[in-house]
Amino acid sequence: MTALSRPTGLCYDVNTLRQEAFGFMIDDLTVARVARLSRLELSADEVAQFRDQLGEILAYVQTLESLDLGGVPPSAPAPAAGGALREDIVGPCLSHEAAVANAPAVLNGYFAVPPVIPGE
């Protein structure tokens, strides 16, 4: 895994900002929970590495949030609303047979796909 590097020109103490701005530190349980929700298996070293990196990210975001950007114009115009989509016109549906006709595998009339999550 590659460690995150902080941008040049910003001076802040990560540990101080992390504790002062958020009142807590990212702990191993938080990293383990995020890893589980992401279906990642992390070693103890990786948990420690991600704990530090996530803390640095939060400290950097807190630094960005403290900037006064009141007089700064947006860097890109907002996209124009509408006009990008075609009209939603009701048309004939595929028959069940036509829908599964080119499927690589069919089981009991349904698309057969390999399991996405092993063991479930």
Image (cartoon, rainbow, N blue to C red):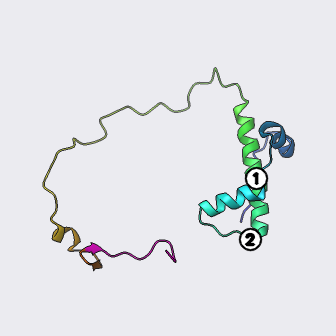
Please tell me whether mark 2 sits on a helix, a strand or a loop: loop
Cβ atoms at labels 1 and 2 below 8 Å apart: no
Q: How far across and how far down the image is residue 31, in percent?
A: 71, 58
* Residue 92 versus residue 44 in the image, above or below: above
105 or 67: which is nearer to us? 105
Q: Main secondary structure of the magenta part?
A: loop
Q: What residue is shown at x 26% (from left), y 78% (from top)?
A: 108
Q: In the image, is 34 to the left or to the right of 104?
A: right
* Residue 102 versus residue 88 in the image, above or below: below
25 or 9: which is nearer to us? 25
Q: How far across and how far down the image is residue 72, in percent?
A: 62, 24
Which range is magenta? 110-120
Please name the residue that numbered disc 2 is placed on: 43
Instruction: Tell me the quadrant of the picture where the N terminus can be found.
Output: bottom right
- Quadrant hosting residue 11: top right
Please name the residue that numbered disc 1 is placed on: 5
Amino acid type for the residue under numbered disc 2: Ser
Q: What residue is shown at x 79% (from left), y 62% (from top)?
A: 48
Q: In the image, is 79 to the left or to the right of 9?
A: left
Amino acid type for the residue under numbered disc 1: Ser
* Residue 71 versus residue 9 in the image, above or below: above
